[in-house]
Image (cartoon, helix red, strand yellow):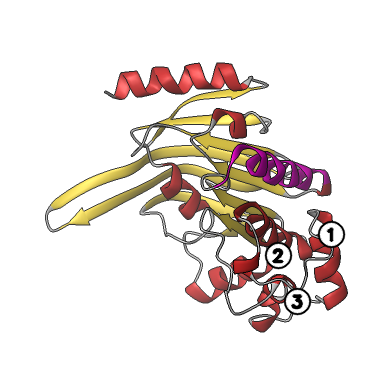
Amino acid sequence: MVLLLAESLEFTVRTGALRQPILRGIDLAVEAGTMTAIMGPSGSGKSTLLNCLAGLVRPTAGRLRFDGKDLVRASARELDRLRRADFGFVFQSYNLIEALNAEQNVLLPTLFTRLPLTRGDARQALAGVDLDGLERRYPDQLSGGQRQRVAIARAMAVRRKVLFADEPTGALDTDSGAAVMDDLARLPETGTAVLVVTHDPVVAAYASRVLFLRDGLVVDTVTGASARDLALRIASLRGAAA
């Protein structure tokens, strides 16, 4: 089932009379229970595409629908409600509240919406990412990998239809990054669609599909590729962009 559908999606930055196209006609269908990675050279539009798909940035042209809803014409309140109820987010910077412990950070969304989430649910979500027993620890008492897994537990505590991850392992060492990706890779088994922006071919190899962007366009789509194959492909794109 297609959850998220983008057609001819564009995003242009305007500065006075100057127009700089960032996305130039993206077509993309995201199905439930899949993981899609987005790769490309710096400046190719990866994060902008993710932000448009997540409703954080409004496209300047094209169509974008989630579960039948028109996100281009949706009001700010409708988009906010969608991000609270159906979309989850994992960013490189963790986005945890330093004054709250791990359990409280998982419960944070309940402060803004009426989610049916209890302390037991939060502890179960933390146990699901191997943080059982660390519920009372504050972010400064956790490693970078553990903090990122708290963010994943927060997204997992209430099942989200789509989870958006922007460089989720960018600040982590190899072992911590692998543990985080193992957690994210389990989400499609529950029906959640996962979209990951990454520069790391090892991370992208977890995905069932990898999109390559260059200059705001999807220039290639591959499935079932190894990390080595993905590294060679992204190197060729960087060479072409040089």
Percent position (x, y) of residue 223? Answer: 64, 23
Q: Which mark is residue 127?
A: 1
Residue found 85% across the figure and 70% down from its top:
121
For badge 1, the amino acid type reads Ala
- Residue labelled with disc 3: 115
Magenta-drawn segment: 172-189
Residue found 79% across the figure and 48% down from its top:
191
Does the image show residue 67? no
- Specify which label sits upstream in the sequence, 3 or 2: 3
In the rendered image, which quarter is residue 161 located in?
bottom right
- Specify which label sits upstream in the sequence, 1 or 2: 1
Does the image show residue 206? yes
- Residue labelled with disc 2: 154
Mark 2 surroundings: few (<14), some (14-19) or many (≥20) residues within 10 A? many
Q: Which mark is residue 77?
A: none
For badge 3, the amino acid type reads Leu
Give the camera-side residue of 55 and 88.
88
Q: In the picture provided, is 40 more to the left or to the right than 64?
A: left
Residue found 51% across the figure and 21% down from its top:
231
The secondary structure making up most of the magenta span is helix
Q: In the picture provided, is 153 more to the left or to the right than 223?
A: right
For badge 2, the amino acid type reads Arg
Percent position (x, y) of residue 31? Answer: 69, 42
Mark 1 surroundings: few (<14), some (14-19) or many (≥20) residues within 10 A? some
Q: CA distance from mark 1 to mark 2?
A: 12 Å
Q: In the picture provided, is 242 more to the left or to the right than 111?
A: left
Q: CA distance from mark 3 to mark 1?
A: 20 Å
- Specify which label sits upstream in the sequence, 3 or 1: 3
